[in-house]
Amino acid sequence: QSTKVHQALVAGSTSAGIMVPAGTRLRFGPGDRVECCICTRSFEDRWQPGVIASIFYREEGFARGMFAAYQVRLDDGRLAFPPSGG
């Protein structure tokens, strides 16, 4: 059974709103099944199933000391970055 998390960004989207400092208390851990609400280009929300691939994920260009709370591998292979509050 998967748990729904709120709006997620697909890789390549802006990272505003998903960044958290290290040590933030997170609801999910690696391997947890979730569903991410992905906003389509036509601004329709679609729930996509996936798995938490990593927590406190970093990429070049992220602000110093800040992380994406989650990196989710969607079942269709895309990566998404939901906010920590999910």
Image (tube, grey):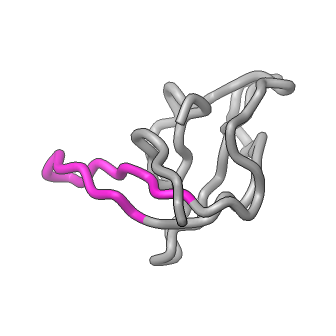
- Tell me if 59 is positioned left or right of 39 in this view: right
Give the residue at the far front of this rendering. Answer: 1
Give the residue at the far left of this rendering. Answer: 42
Kindly identify the residue that appears in the image at 46 percent across and 49 percent down.
4
From what the image shows, is residue 54 above or below residue 59? below
From what the image shows, is residue 2 above or below residue 19? below
- Tell me if 22 is positioned left or right of 45 in this view: right
* The N terminus, quarter of image: bottom right
| Place of residue 35 in the rendered image (x, y in percent of width and height, measured from the top left) | 46, 57
- Tell me if 55 is positioned left or right of 51 in this view: right
Kindly identify the residue that appears in the image at 78 percent across and 24 percent down.
24
Query: What's the magenta bit mostly, secondary-structure-wise?
Result: strand
| Place of residue 10 in the rendered image (x, y in percent of width and height, measured from the top left) | 45, 54
**Which quadrant would residue 47 be assigned to in this image?**
bottom left
Kindly identify the residue that appears in the image at 13 percent across and 51 percent down.
42
**Which quadrant would residue 52 be assigned to in this image?**
bottom right
From what the image shows, is residue 63 above or below residue 40? above
Q: Which residues are magenta?
A: 34-48
Asked if residue 43 is among those painted magenta in the image, a careful observer would answer: yes
